[in-house]
Image (cartoon, rainbow, N blue to C red):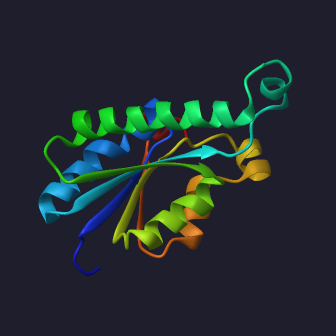
Amino acid sequence: MNEIKTILVTTDFSDTSNKAFPIARGLAEKYDARIVLAFVEEDRLPPLVLEYTDIGIEEIVKRQHQRASSQLLRIGKEQFGSLDVETKAISGIPHLEIVQIAEEVQADLIVMATHGRGFISHAILGSTTERVVRRAPCPVLVVRDAVQQKEG
């Protein structure tokens, strides 16, 4: 691998995705790399949300984006301190958007955690992480939860 200048770190705001932060921070410090911290909101809302609310879909999406953006800023400060951090909160299909962000920012490495769902769920739904690994324009470092490692 060549020099690491830009590291894309993904989050879905879960405890599992938080496992990627210390590793990404350590690599960014070692290589003096910038961090791009990204969250992709699934662009589909459950039918019940749309059916039982007086708020328009545009307003719901706007509020979700604002909430995600502020969470990313907080995480950036808490987890990456004085490092160079750019945040991106977008809507779309997570694995496709993550790959697109990696291309746009010319990421040298993607760091992401995996939920390690069970066999049935994985067989039916696949895995965002697996899909990113297959399509990514750069290496992907996958971080597993220690609890999952003991079970799986």
User: Quadrant of residue 29 in the image?
Assistant: bottom left
Observer able to see residue 13: no
Could you tell me which residue is drawn at 13 percent across and 60 percent down? 30
User: Quadrant of residue 71 in the image?
Assistant: top left
Front-lying residue, 28 or 83: 83
Could you tell me which residue is drawn at 33 percent across and 38 percent down? 73
Q: Image height check: is 115 above or below 74?
A: below
Q: Image height check: is 97 above or below 104?
A: above
Q: Is residue 3 left or right of residue 69?
A: left
Observer able to see residue 74: yes
Q: Image height check: is 76 above or below 110?
A: above
Q: Quadrant of the N terminus?
A: bottom left
Q: Position of residue 121 (x, y in %)?
A: 74, 42
Q: Position of residue 36 (x, y in %)?
A: 34, 56
Could you tell me which residue is drawn at 31 percent across and 43 percent down? 21
Q: Is residue 59 left or right of residue 28?
A: right
Front-lying residue, 149 or 20: 20
Q: Image height check: is 34 above or below 106?
A: above
Q: Position of residue 138 (x, y in %)?
A: 42, 74
Could you tell me which residue is drawn at 84 percent across and 31 percent down? 47
Q: Quadrant of the C terminus?
A: top right
Q: Is residue 31 left or right of residue 21?
A: left
Looking at the image, the residue that sits furthest to the bottom is 2
Q: Is residue 43 left or right of residue 37?
A: right
Give the number of marks. Answer: 0
